[in-house]
Amino acid sequence: MTLSEKEILTINKFSQNDQVLHLEIGEYVKKMFTPTQGKSLETQIDEIANDFSQEFLSANNANTNIDIDLIIRNFGDSKIPTQPTDFESYFQSLNENIIAHSIHTSSPQFIGHMTSALPSFVRPLAKLMTAMNQNAVKIETAKTLSFCEREALAMMHRQIYNLSDNFYIQHIQNNQSTLGILVSGGTTANITALWCARNKSLGAKNEFLGIEKEGLSAALNFYGYKGAVIIGSELMHFSFDKAADLMGISTQNLIRVAVDSNNQVNLQALRQVVADCHEKNLHIIAIVGIAGTTDSGSVDPLEDIAEIAQENNVHFHVDAAWGGPVIFSQKHRHKLAGIEKADSVTIDGHKQLYLPMGIGMVFFHDPYLASSIEKHASYTMRKGSFDLGKRALEGSRPGMALFLHAGLKLIGLKGYEFLIDEGIRKTQYMAARISAMPEFELLAEPDTNLLIYRYIPEQFRAVIVKQQFTEADNQIINNFNEYLQKMQRQIGRTFISRTTKTTISFNKEIPVIAMRAVIANPLTTEEDIDAVLNDQIQIASEISNSYFLK
Ligand SMILES: *Cc1c(COP(=O)(O)O)cnc(C)c1O
């Protein structure tokens, strides 16, 4: 028997006879895989999905105000349906239960996270990528795409390190070389970078076979160290905790050095920590510099950190997951000066390269460093092959290189420069607005396109301006900001995220709860920024009375 396309779309009755049912379902499921011409099942679903997607993308508010409890109740089913669900009702429920209450990350007034709008070309490209279904782990499942990936990574590498034409001719498609690795995100990129640093610095020597074969304790024993550490600023992303944990050095040995009031690592303290580690006979696997902290967008003094790392012969890693693409801007790239001295650099494609989620990258100054993590398998990943999976943490991996390649070609250097410059320009606009408004306090001058500030309830404005507030005042302001941010999120018209910043006041460290704006969406206008701030003022005035009477 064969089912018509229309039947497939709406069918919800299957035979009661088990044997017939088996055949029917077999036919039905096979149909899902069969490409057809004309008004096929696929084109019908595509139309539905397109409508949903258009509607979703044109929404103005940041979110709906649906309660989390209701969502939880909607997703309490632990049974897989016995029979296939018909497409029409499934897509209907998808729309009502999932799409309708998803976060409008592309709304121009959703300016609180690093996830933002995407250029429209990525959506059809996503379809194409799924149609091709390449597995980037090896040549036998991703032939041209492996070389396309290497090319796109080389373009980014050149943007960071700017080495000679000859260098790129020699390494771009050389299976012994790894200019970069495409991974699923900044977390995996950071882990990969530190993994390479660890294996290289505790590698094989004389009778010792290397940490990879003999493990951490044997390595420390052989080299005569008491332990191993990773050092960076206290604002290091929590992916470094994961890395320290996985690498077996313990999260306690991820040493977080204090930052100055500008959120940059304190260099004197960093030098002291390095000296202390030598004193205590601790092996330093890497020193990390951050180019765009997740918290406030600040950039560490990379030149100085590079110098400290070099003096001590330690691997220098730069986490530029967020801030990396600032190198595209002639006007602002000086903020990342020193990044070219890094042994490894992390950049996220799904942040400021405006590509879909699932694109992280790690780059290496030394094209042979990644051989320290190389693995082989008998059925594939042979020595000397071009299989990308042999020097990667991940195994099977989608052809995300397609997006990176397309982004670099279709947007280009000048396009990315515009996007970066615009984000920073609008952030400076927002900072100026905040400084001029009595309702707000700017908590740090923005380095890039992240901004932290807070709302000041009316009764505290005078003492804040005079810097005469007490610790108790600060606590009340903190609580109010936390409540305000939650209310704004719940109402859902606009969105700003929240973070906690420690500052030195009253001669001790006190927590300051801050609003955190991320201005990345190219369609966010100055009017949108004003609207978000005004929304906060309105919500604050609505909640003020009831809040302070509590
Ligand atoms: C986002 C970010 C990460 C983590 O990247 P994911 O893609 O979320 O895994 C690491 N470091 C910094 C500075 C980041 O901004």
Image (cartoon, rainbow, N blue to C red):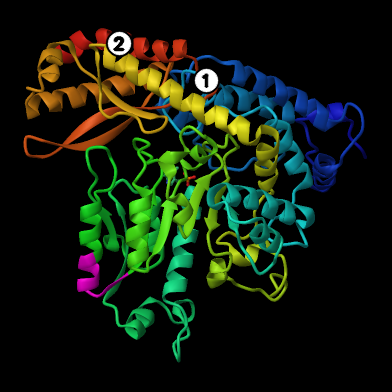
Quarter containing the C terminus: top left
Query: Which is nearer the N-term, disc 1 or disc 2?
Result: 1
Q: Is residue 519 visible?
A: no
Identity of the residue drawn at 47% across and 60% down: 343
Give percent across and percent down for residue 273.
22, 61
Give percent across and percent down for residue 254.
30, 59
Q: Is residue 292 left or right of residue 23?
A: left
- Of residues 470 and 298, the one drawn nearer to the viewer in this rendering: 298
Q: Which residue is mark 2?
A: 537
Q: Is residue 520 left or right of residue 465?
A: right
Identity of the residue drawn at 58% across and 25% down: 99
Mark 1 CB lies closer than 8 A to ligand 1: no
Q: Which residues are magenta?
A: 275-283
Q: Is residue 76 left or right of residue 157?
A: left
Q: What kind of element bears circle 2?
A: helix
Which quadrant of the view contains residue 82? top right
